[in-house]
C-alpha cells in the first residue's frame, strides 16, 4: 500500500468513528425527548 492509500484509509476510519459518535449523541437526545 502507498502512503496516500493508508492515509486516506485512516481518514475514512476516523470519519466513521466521529460520525458514529455524533449519531450516538443524536439518538441519546431523541431517547431523552421520548421519555421526558
Image (cartoon, grey):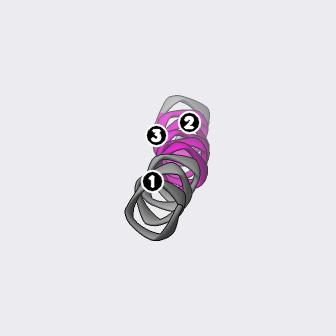
Q: What element carries label 2?
A: helix
Tell me if residue 21 can be seen: yes
Q: Which residue position holds label 3?
A: 5
Q: Residue 32 location in percent, x, y?
A: 54, 60
Q: Main secondary structure of the magenta part?
A: helix
CA gap between label 3 and label 2 equals 10 Å
Packing grade of label 2 (10 A; few <14, some 14-19, many >=20) is: few
Q: Earlier in the sequence, mark 3 or mark 2?
A: 3
- The residue positioned 44% from the left and 59% from the top of the image is 27
Quarter-of-image position of residue 11: top right
The magenta-colored residue range is 5-22
Q: What element carries label 3?
A: helix
Q: Which residue position holds label 1?
A: 33
- Of 27 and 4, nearer the camera is 27
| Relative to 19, 17 lies left or right | right
Any magenta on residue 27?
Answer: no
Q: Earlier in the sequence, mark 1 or mark 3?
A: 3
Packing grade of label 3 (10 A; few <14, some 14-19, many >=20) is: few
Any magenta on residue 18?
Answer: yes
- The residue positioned 51% from the left and 39% from the top of the image is 15
Nearest-to-viewer mark from 3 and 2: 2
Q: Which residue position holds label 2?
A: 11
Amino acid at each position: 500500500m502507498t502512503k496516500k492509500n493508508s492515509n486516506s484509509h485512516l481518514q475514512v476510519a476516523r470519519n466513521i468513528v466521529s460520525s458514529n459518535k455524533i449519531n450516538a449523541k443524536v439518538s441519546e437526545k431523541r431517547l431523552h425527548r421520548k421519555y421526558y
